[in-house]
Image (spheres, rainbow, N blue to C red):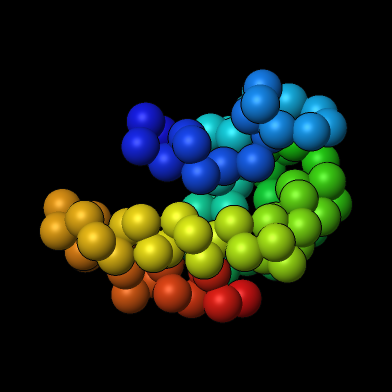
Amino acid sequence: MGELEPLLPGKVTDCGVTAKDNRRFIEAVLWIARTGAPWRDLPECFGRWHTVYMRYNRWSKKGGWQRIAETWADDPDLEPLMPWATLVWLA
């Protein structure tokens, strides 16, 4: 998650709660994007589906996914990910 970490909410320097599970959260969102499953079918290993969905929705409203997509768009090594990423970020 290295270069994405500064873009993610929940850092020690942010107001509010520090997110200790950004990696697991992003993996959950990627699982939803990859499988096309409804949020309610999210495996329990990713946490409560509703909590994950609400966090996803909050990030969407605050432009978090947009910042990540813009960062990835400039990285030629991640270019193959961009077609599906557009679907996730705009969902």
Residue under the image location 83 percent in, 32 percent down: 16
Task: Please report the residue visible at 83 percent of the width from the left and 46 percent of the height from the top.
Answer: 51
List the single residue furthest toward the left: 76
Image coords of residue 34 (percent x, y): 46, 61
In terms of depth relative to the viewer, which is nearer, 58 or 44? 58
Residue 32 is situated, as x and y percent measured from the top left of the image, at 58, 59
Q: Name the residue rendered at 49%, 59% in the picture.
A: 67
Q: Is residue 30 above or below residue 4?
A: below
Q: Is residue 58 left or right of residue 64?
A: right
Is residue 49 among what the camera can see? Answer: no
43 lies above or below 64:
above
Q: Position of residue 82 (x, y in %)?
A: 32, 68
In this rendering, would 8 be left or right of 16? left
Does residue 42 appear anywhere in the picture?
A: yes
Which corner quadrant holds the N terminus? top left
Residue at 24% x, 61% y: name it: 74
In the image: residue 35, left or right of residue 74: right
Percent coordinates x, y for residue 8 in the rendering: 57, 42
Image quadrant holding the C terminus, namely bottom right
Q: How many numbered marks appear?
A: 0
Tell me the quarter of the picture where residue 71 sits: bottom left
